[in-house]
Image (cartoon, helix red, strand yellow):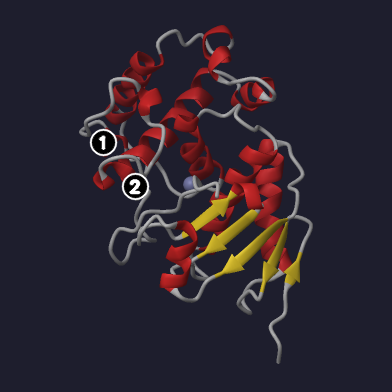
Amino acid sequence: MPPVDLQTNAALLKSPPAWIDSTRINKIADNIQSELEWSIRRVTVIWHLDQAAFEKIHKLGPLPRAVALKNKNEIHLGPKVTKENFDTIFGHELVHMVAFQKYKQAIPAWLEEGLANDISKNSRVDYQWLIKQALPTQVTDLAHPFQGDEGRVPLHYAASQALVEMLRDRCDFKNLLRLSVGRTMESYLVTYCGIKDLSKSFNEWIKKKAGQKSSGPIELHYHDQGKGQPVILIHGWPTG
Ligand SMILES: [Zn+2]
């Protein structure tokens, strides 16, 4: 039987595995579309069963499990994407797509990975772990998850997601996103959220959250669902 494509309003999946259906795709896309108030321009989703072929597409080495090629409006999924982790990984990449389709440059680079994890409900931030890490003096230096030392990648994701949580706490985040369209979010941090010094506020936020008792088990965001070795979630930066 020839491979069958699956098309929904949000995505065209080329030869997807049999366990994926449109109900599952719609549920993931609907959540993101409602959070980000946007109708996704249909994204092409390409599945790679061969790791080497997948790495050839993104040239980021063995860590990413999926990538969003924003300019091509394509999401590429690698062989480590499974029935169990598909929803959060696909959701994460769709957030990157909306960031590009709707917000252009409005969402700062230091926030986008965190936003993608936050909205796709990828994980929770482990503040006890985060407070022990050497954070950059300026959080805005968290510009690219694969910049510099590979060991810093988990820190980038955790810090960026913690920044989203701080902004949700400090102001109406949905409205902050609304205000930022066609502009840049940074200009509203002072005027709308009352944050004069982002890095200082962030350090205080981490201290406060790390001091609170957690309500349940915390998964590090870069782990698979509790089994196997740590795997970096994904990444949406390549634009080529
Ligand atoms: Zn990403």
Q: Position of residue 223 (x, y in %)?
A: 34, 56
**What amino acid type should be assigned to the residue bearing mark 1?**
Gln
Q: Which residue is mark 2?
A: 218
What residue appears at the point 35 percent right and 50 percent down from the top-left corner?
A: 219
Crowding at dot 1, Cα within 10 Å, few <14 / some 14-19 / many 20+, comes out as some
Residue 157 sits in which quadrant?
top left
In the rendered structure, find residue 128 and report the number of the disc placed on it: 1
What residue appears at the point 28 percent right and 40 percent down from the top-left corner?
A: 148
Q: Position of residue 204 (x, y in %)?
A: 32, 18
- Circles 1 and 2, Cβ within 8 Å, touching? The answer is yes
Nearest the viewer among 188 and 72 is 72
Task: Work out whether mark 1 precedes mark 2 in sequence or the reverse, and give the earlier one.
Answer: 1
Residue 76 sits in which quadrant?
bottom right
Q: CA distance from mark 1 to mark 2?
A: 10 Å
Q: Is residue 79 visible?
A: no
Q: Is residue 133 above or below residue 192?
A: below
Query: Secondary structure beneath disc 2?
Result: loop
| Quadrant occupied by the N terminus | bottom right
Q: Is residue 175 above or below residue 23?
A: above
What residue appears at the point 71 percent right and 50 percent down from the top-left corner?
A: 30
Does the residue tagged 1 have its C-beta within 8 Å of any atom of ligand 1? Answer: no
